[in-house]
Image: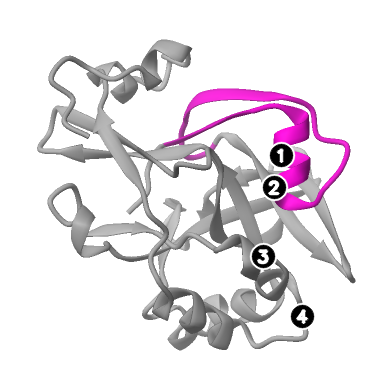
Amino acid sequence: MCGRFALVASSNDIEQEFGVSGVGPIARYNIAPSQEILTIVGNGNARVAMASIWGLHRSDGGLLINIRSETAAGRPHIRRLLEHGRCIIPASGFYEWVGPRQPYFLRTPSGLMGFAGLHVRERDPASGKLVLRSAILTRAADPTLAHLHNRMPVIVPRALYGDWLSPTFEGDDVLRHICAGEPIPLQWYRVSPRVGNVANDDPGLLEPSPDSTR
């Protein structure tokens, strides 16, 4: 699963990686569910950066923050989003916990990655305004990461950003193609348990802890 991630990047880095404009620098070290996140959506042949809230409302009142890629197409509501609500959620990396207390930070050598996401506009009951909400698709972890967690976000290769966002392609087909491809290499290392508290959001969270192994 993915329950916490970070996005620390300059405007230029985000614009160059994801092909969008008008995005300011972002320094978020501990992004948690129900918080605002950067979301890239398709708009014809263009890509647009928008703010969304991480988590779709569930019928039981909870938040759906992760959606299993293996079963997404078999759930009618999720299948509709897979066809008409695909998005990319930019990240510098994500956190996973080994046991209850030891978090790891996982990142790509290039510094930025794009999670495969699904988004929907929902009416906020408090304000009555339409709000964009999103969730992250997950998959079985690459074997090299299985000792950290058995699940991980679906990471869209840069060459497939356009396909993932394009309404020309069937969502289920693109998702299968992404998941069947070569895994994107990740680096990981231990970080401070301070990341477990959502009130902490500072550069120290990304610093390797003593005895970090990789």
Could you tell me which secondary element the residue under label 4 belongs to?
A: loop
Density class for disc 1 (Cα within 10 Å; few <14, some 14-19, many ≥20) is: many
The reply, left or right, for residue 20 in relation to residue 107 is right
Residue 197 locus on image (x, y percent): 33, 20
- Mark pair 1, 2: CA separation: 5 Å
Residue drawn at the location 37% of the way across and 79% of the way down: 70
Q: Given contact means CB atoms under 8 Å apart, are the residues at marks 3 and 2 in contact? A: no
The reply, left or right, for residue 17 in relation to residue 214 is right
Magenta span of residues: 5-34
Q: Which residue is mark 2?
A: 17
Density class for disc 2 (Cα within 10 Å; few <14, some 14-19, many ≥20) is: some
Residue 122 locus on image (x, y percent): 70, 57
Q: Which residue is mark 4?
A: 167
Density class for disc 4 (Cα within 10 Å; few <14, some 14-19, many ≥20) is: some
Q: Which residue is mark 1?
A: 14
Query: In the rendered structure, does residue 22 fall within the stretch colored magenta?
Result: yes
Density class for disc 3 (Cα within 10 Å; few <14, some 14-19, many ≥20) is: many
Mark 1 vs mark 4, foreground winner is 1
Residue type beneath disc 2: Glu
Say above or below: 59 vs 163: above
